[in-house]
Image (tube, rainbow, N blue to C red):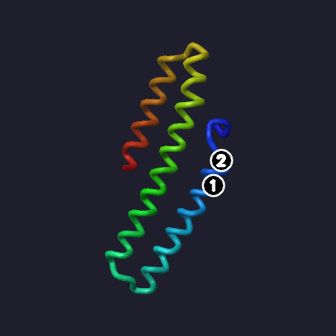
Amino acid sequence: MKQCMDAPNLHRRLKKIIGQVQAIDRMVDEDVPCEDILVQINAAKSALHKVGQIVLEGHLQHCVRDGIAKGDADATVAKFAKAVEHFARMS
């Protein structure tokens, strides 16, 4: 699975998201207006969605292509459809 992902890029993005979530936590303690907190929550959510897109694209480019090339197209497409379904629930 690791070969189908740009792990350094994902780690960099995830560390940024962790920082965003920690900042949101501090905002709650600092009594920041709700609207400002919601803006930051949306930014973190969007960043996490982008990470999901990158993982899904990597899965398509590597795992799905590999499965089809090995002659296991039906199972590969079914697994990809399931992955897309899981990702779509995230939105």
52 relative to 43, above or below: above
Q: Position of residue 7 (x, y in %)?
A: 65, 47
Q: Position of residue 41 (x, y in %)?
A: 41, 66
Using the image as rendered, state which of residue 77 and residue 9 is in the foreground.
9
**What kind of residue is marked 1?**
His
63 relative to 34, above or below: above
Residue drawn at x 56%, y 24% as measured from the top left:
65
Q: Position of residue 39 (x, y in %)?
A: 37, 69
Distance CA(mark 1)–CA(mark 2): 6 Å
* Label placed on residue 75: none
Within 10 Å of the Cα at label 2, are there few (<14), some (14-19), or many (20+) other Cα atoms?
A: few
> What residue does disc 1 label?
11
Q: In terms of secondary structure, where does tag 2 sit?
A: helix
Question: Is mark 1 in CB contact (under 8 Å) with mark 2?
Answer: yes
Quadrant where the N terminus sits is top right
Q: Position of residue 9 (x, y in %)?
A: 62, 51
Quarter of the image where one finds residue 35: bottom left
Seen as rendered, the residue at the extreme top is 71
Tally of numbered discs: 2
Residue drawn at x 57%, y 21% as measured from the top left:
67
Q: Is residue 8 left or right of residue 86?
A: right
35 relative to 79, above or below: below
Residue drawn at x 51%, y 23% as measured from the top left:
76
Q: In terms of secondary structure, where does tag 1 sit?
A: helix
* Label placed on residue 7: 2
**What kind of residue is marked 2?**
Ala
Seen as rendered, the residue at the extreme left is 35
